[in-house]
Amino acid sequence: MADSRAHSLYQSYSRRKGNLPRSSAGRRPAAARGGPRPPPRPAADHALHELAALSRALFGAPDEAEILRLAMDHVAAAGPYSAEAGYLNVVGDLVPTPRDGQMPASAVSRRVRELAGQDGAVTVAGRPWARALGLRGSPGGLHGYLVVTSRSRPTKAERSLLAMLVRHTAAALSAAFADRLRREDALELRRLREERTVLQRQLISVAAELGYERAVHALMADVAASGGGEEAVTRALHGLTGLPALVEDRFGRLKSWTGHGRPDPYPEPDPVRQDEMLRTVAKEAGPVRIKDRLVTLVRPHGEILGVLALVDTRYEADEHTVLALGHAATSLALELGHQRKLAEVELRLHRELADDLLAGTDEASAYARSEAVGHDLHGSHYVVVVQWLNRTADDSFAQTVRRAVSAVGMRSLLTCHADQVVLIAGGRPHARALYEALARETGIRSGTIGVSAPCDSVDDIPHRYQEAQRALEVRRHSRERYGTSFFDELGLYRILGPGSGHRELETFVQEWLGQLIDYDSRHHATMVETLSRYFDCGGNYDETAESLGIHRSTLRYRLQRIRDISGNDLVNVEDRLNLQVATRVWKIVLGGPG
């Protein structure tokens, strides 16, 4: 019965779409004309052809609602099914789609929400078989649900056809969802550009009302012609006032200087004094004189993005100078705020791609998306994991890492995972350049960077991510915990990573250190830690005793006790190697004491 139904549906659907030849729809069958009757095609073939036609229609639909409606209208193409209900995920809420003008039963809607993204059975009167099937895909996760019922239990082949229809529907929803996101991003970028234009025009109008129209107009014209960056502002401001003009970031690092007297090298900022200066200037409505400088803040919407200043050693500034400085700061605030918003949009797109690459994604899609965001994903790449003391991996720290990466000329995609910033970088990072750049940006050197082995395929990126994390963890547990570690330089530590079974590692440690661990537990001693430190110091008695804060004779006594308790000889090459490996596993993989 199911095969005949599928055959009938296929014929009706194909006639509507123009898939059947005119002769099959408008002439009598050959048998009725007396000719030989052609053998019928298998019903399964008809169902597959109909699903193929439906798939093309799904991907050609204008929006998610039309895609779901098509799937509900043609679910019978997969077997003895009918669509009981359909739901679309709208901002986290499952919104029902009417079926023949009627909304689904409240019990069905309640059951679908209870499934929380999973497939499951539902109860529909008069239908012995009913299932809620999640429409899942990327981006966006769960796109909705399709509730399908049947008056008889579907066969295995019919269930396979239904699963194929669900997958095609979910894929079409993913494509429509991604297309909508792209359109929204384009509209947002256009809105930001229009907002910047409006605000700049308003600033020109204010300058005209204050009687300084010509000078401010010249400033704005110069800034606009050059793209509105820091150098354009300082150049125009210097031309108006005759005083050296400069821009610093909020940390006190020089961004631009126009005019005579630029210090070389520019002094390194003092973080404490810089914060005090920012607080002092922020309390006032206009520019503030600090020693030989007139200083004003660049802060769109209250966020300090930098400092604009004039160097006035002879106290020549008048009200026109102050007015020009104020308008220049406003102009720069608009430009930097606009750049910040554009950077945030770009960063979000980079993060989405980086997250998918770290989790594993389709190679063709990855290359297409990377090209769209301006990153060349071809060639060798490295996964880089950055963790800094007392710095949460939030947007602020991500921007800090982004500036450091730009300063050292690294091409990369950036995202945040847990308490780490993760980079997918083109080319092998320099051993110290990124660390030094981050130390300058953050003002502290208490940070650790892990770098994976080279990756030549998109499919290898998730594994390389584990390698980078491993390199970072080894560095954090080493004597010099701050700096950069490369996975391909870890030596023995490479075999102590996630690739080794945890049970086997525990067995190995118990075999070689079990008696010492038990002794430490019973006597509150530190024999295993002493042995580990002894190996870390290369067997040097003086260095080991100093690192443990004990006397050399105490160390000798402990090492003798270790030989007595464990029954192992530290002079024997094989025993020494196995004990050293066991202490590394105990300390790094199994977590050390406790």
Image (cartoon, rainbow, N blue to C red):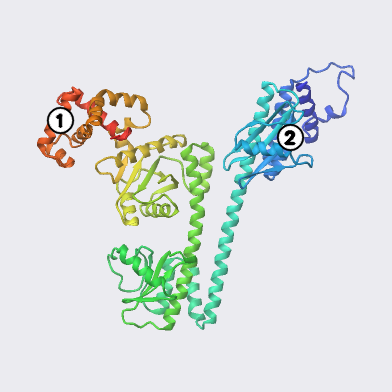
Tag 2: residue type? Glu
Nearer-the-camera pick, 132 or 594: 594
Q: Quadrant of the N terminus?
A: top right
Q: Residue 294: in sight, yes or no?
A: yes
Q: Which residue is mark 1?
A: 559
Q: Front-most of 187 and 493?
A: 493
Residue 271 horizontal/vertical position (percent): 32, 62
Dot 1 or dot 2: first in sequence order is: 2
| 521, 98: nearer the viewer | 521
Name the residue: 50% across, 50% down. Answer: 348
Query: How far is the residue under mark 1 from the one under mark 2?
Result: 76 Å
Residue 15, numbered label:
none
Q: Residue furthest right?
A: 33
Q: Quadrant of residue 29?
A: top right
Asked which secondary structure carries label 1, the reply is: helix
Q: Quadrant of residue 510?
A: top left
Image x and y of residue 309, in percent = 38, 72
- Can you identify the residue that label 2 sits on? 84
Query: What is the quadrant of residue 256 in the picture?
Result: bottom left
Q: Residue 225: percent from the left, percent from the top?
A: 49, 69
In the picture, measured across the screen, residue 86 lies left or right of residue 470, that is right
Residue 268 vs 327, above or below: the answer is: above
The 10 Å Cα crowd at callout 2, few under 14, some 14 to 19, many 20 or more, is: many
Observer-nearest of 584 and 212: 584
State how many labels appear.
2
